[in-house]
Image: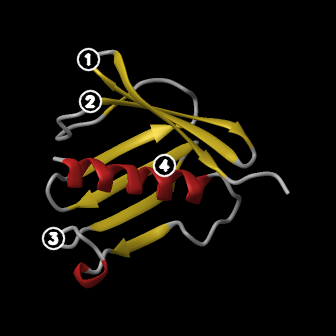
Protein backbone atom coordinates (compact mmCIF):
# COMPACT_ATOMS: atom_id res chain seq x y z
CA UNK A 1 0.00 0.00 0.00
CA UNK A 2 2.83 2.45 0.79
CA UNK A 3 4.50 1.72 -2.57
CA UNK A 4 1.22 2.42 -4.37
CA UNK A 5 0.77 5.64 -2.40
CA UNK A 6 4.34 6.73 -3.24
CA UNK A 7 3.78 6.01 -6.94
CA UNK A 8 0.65 8.16 -6.92
CA UNK A 9 2.57 11.03 -5.34
CA UNK A 10 5.26 10.66 -8.00
CA UNK A 11 2.58 10.68 -10.68
CA UNK A 12 1.12 13.88 -9.26
CA UNK A 13 4.48 15.58 -9.14
CA UNK A 14 5.00 14.77 -12.81
CA UNK A 15 1.46 15.86 -13.71
CA UNK A 16 1.78 19.22 -12.03
CA UNK A 17 5.35 19.83 -13.14
CA UNK A 18 4.31 19.06 -16.69
CA UNK A 19 1.36 21.40 -16.68
CA UNK A 20 2.54 24.48 -14.81
CA UNK A 21 4.90 25.47 -17.62
CA UNK A 22 3.75 26.36 -21.11
CA UNK A 23 4.80 24.01 -23.95
CA UNK A 24 6.48 21.70 -21.48
CA UNK A 25 8.31 18.75 -23.07
CA UNK A 26 7.41 16.54 -20.09
CA UNK A 27 3.90 16.04 -21.44
CA UNK A 28 4.01 12.59 -22.96
CA UNK A 29 4.46 8.97 -21.90
CA UNK A 30 7.02 7.51 -19.51
CA UNK A 31 7.85 3.97 -18.45
CA UNK A 32 9.39 3.33 -15.06
CA UNK A 33 12.36 0.99 -15.27
CA UNK A 34 12.29 -1.79 -12.65
CA UNK A 35 16.05 -1.66 -12.14
CA UNK A 36 15.79 2.00 -11.16
CA UNK A 37 12.63 1.71 -9.07
CA UNK A 38 11.29 -0.15 -6.07
CA UNK A 39 8.03 -0.62 -7.98
CA UNK A 40 7.45 -3.98 -9.56
CA UNK A 41 6.09 -4.54 -12.17
CA UNK A 42 7.09 -1.36 -14.01
CA UNK A 43 4.35 1.14 -14.69
CA UNK A 44 3.70 3.51 -17.55
CA UNK A 45 2.48 7.07 -16.97
CA UNK A 46 0.87 9.14 -19.71
CA UNK A 47 -0.10 12.81 -19.34
CA UNK A 48 -1.89 14.62 -22.14
CA UNK A 49 -3.34 18.11 -22.25
CA UNK A 50 -7.11 18.00 -22.65
CA UNK A 51 -9.10 21.19 -22.92
CA UNK A 52 -8.33 23.34 -19.89
CA UNK A 53 -6.86 20.42 -17.94
CA UNK A 54 -5.02 17.13 -18.24
CA UNK A 55 -5.83 13.48 -18.92
CA UNK A 56 -3.72 11.16 -16.78
CA UNK A 57 -3.34 7.42 -17.30
CA UNK A 58 -1.09 5.16 -15.21
CA UNK A 59 -0.99 1.58 -16.44
CA UNK A 60 -0.31 -1.06 -13.83
CA UNK A 61 -1.86 -2.00 -10.54
CA UNK A 62 -3.72 0.00 -9.55
CA UNK A 63 -4.70 1.53 -12.88
CA UNK A 64 -5.25 5.28 -12.74
CA UNK A 65 -7.26 7.01 -15.49
CA UNK A 66 -8.90 10.39 -15.08
CA UNK A 67 -9.31 13.84 -16.58
CA UNK A 68 -9.13 16.92 -14.38
CA UNK A 69 -9.48 20.60 -15.14
CA UNK A 70 -7.55 23.42 -13.48
CA UNK A 71 -10.82 24.91 -12.22
CA UNK A 72 -10.58 23.69 -8.60
CA UNK A 73 -13.64 21.44 -8.88
CA UNK A 74 -13.84 17.82 -7.71
CA UNK A 75 -12.97 15.17 -10.31
CA UNK A 76 -13.86 11.50 -9.82
CA UNK A 77 -11.00 8.97 -9.59
CA UNK A 78 -11.45 5.17 -9.51
CA UNK A 79 -9.36 2.23 -8.28
CA UNK A 80 -7.41 4.14 -5.60
CA UNK A 81 -8.24 3.01 -2.05
CA UNK A 82 -6.81 6.16 -0.43
CA UNK A 83 -8.98 8.67 -2.34
CA UNK A 84 -11.80 8.86 -4.89
CA UNK A 85 -11.80 12.56 -5.79
CA UNK A 86 -9.04 14.90 -6.95
CA UNK A 87 -8.98 18.68 -7.19
CA UNK A 88 -6.23 20.51 -9.06
CA UNK A 89 -5.78 24.27 -9.37
CA UNK A 90 -3.07 26.67 -10.37
CA UNK A 91 -1.67 28.83 -7.59
CA UNK A 92 0.38 30.92 -10.02
CA UNK A 93 2.36 30.45 -13.22
CA UNK A 94 4.89 28.15 -11.53
CA UNK A 95 2.90 26.37 -8.82
CA UNK A 96 -0.16 24.18 -8.47
CA UNK A 97 -2.13 22.58 -5.67
CA UNK A 98 -3.55 19.05 -5.62
CA UNK A 99 -6.13 17.93 -3.10
CA UNK A 100 -7.05 14.28 -2.67
CA UNK A 101 -10.42 13.50 -1.07
CA UNK A 102 -12.17 10.37 0.14
CA UNK A 103 -15.98 10.69 -0.02
CA UNK A 104 -15.69 14.47 0.21
CA UNK A 105 -13.27 14.51 3.17
CA UNK A 106 -9.79 15.95 2.51
CA UNK A 107 -7.06 13.31 2.96
CA UNK A 108 -4.00 15.00 1.40
CA UNK A 109 -2.86 18.31 -0.02
CA UNK A 110 0.23 18.74 -2.18
CA UNK A 111 1.71 22.00 -3.40
CA UNK A 112 4.01 21.44 -6.33
CA UNK A 113 6.06 23.85 -8.35
CA UNK A 114 9.34 25.59 -8.64
CA UNK A 115 10.65 28.48 -6.60
CA UNK A 116 10.80 31.91 -8.14
CA UNK A 117 14.35 32.90 -9.03
Q: Secondary structure at mark 2?
A: loop
Q: Which residue is mark 1?
A: 103
Contact (Cβ within 8 Å) of mark 4 with mark 2: no
Q: Residue at x 21, y 73 (%)?
A: 42
How many neighbours does mark 1 have within 10 angstroms: few (below 14), some (14-19), or many (20 or more)? few
Q: Earlier in the sequence, mark 3 or mark 1?
A: 3
Vertically, is 53 above or below 13? above
Residue 12 in the image, given as x and y percentages of width and height: 44, 50
Q: Nearer the viewer, mark 4 or mark 3?
A: 3
Give the quarter of the image for residue 17: bottom right
Q: Earlier in the sequence, mark 1 or mark 2?
A: 2
Q: Which residue is mark 3?
A: 40
Contact (Cβ within 8 Å) of mark 1 with mark 2: yes
Structural distance between the alpha carbons of marks 4 and 3: 26 Å
Residue 40 in the image, given as x and y percentages of width and height: 15, 70
Q: Nearer the viewer, mark 4 or mark 2?
A: 2
Marker disc for residue 84: 2
Q: Which residue is mark 4?
A: 54
Direction top: furthest residue: 104
Structural distance between the alpha carbons of marks 3 and 1: 29 Å
How many neighbours does mark 2 have within 10 angstroms: few (below 14), some (14-19), or many (20 or more)? some
Amino acid sequence: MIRKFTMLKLAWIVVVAATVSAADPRIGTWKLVSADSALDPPRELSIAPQGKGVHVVMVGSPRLDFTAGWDGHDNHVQNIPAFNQIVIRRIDKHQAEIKEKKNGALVATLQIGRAHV
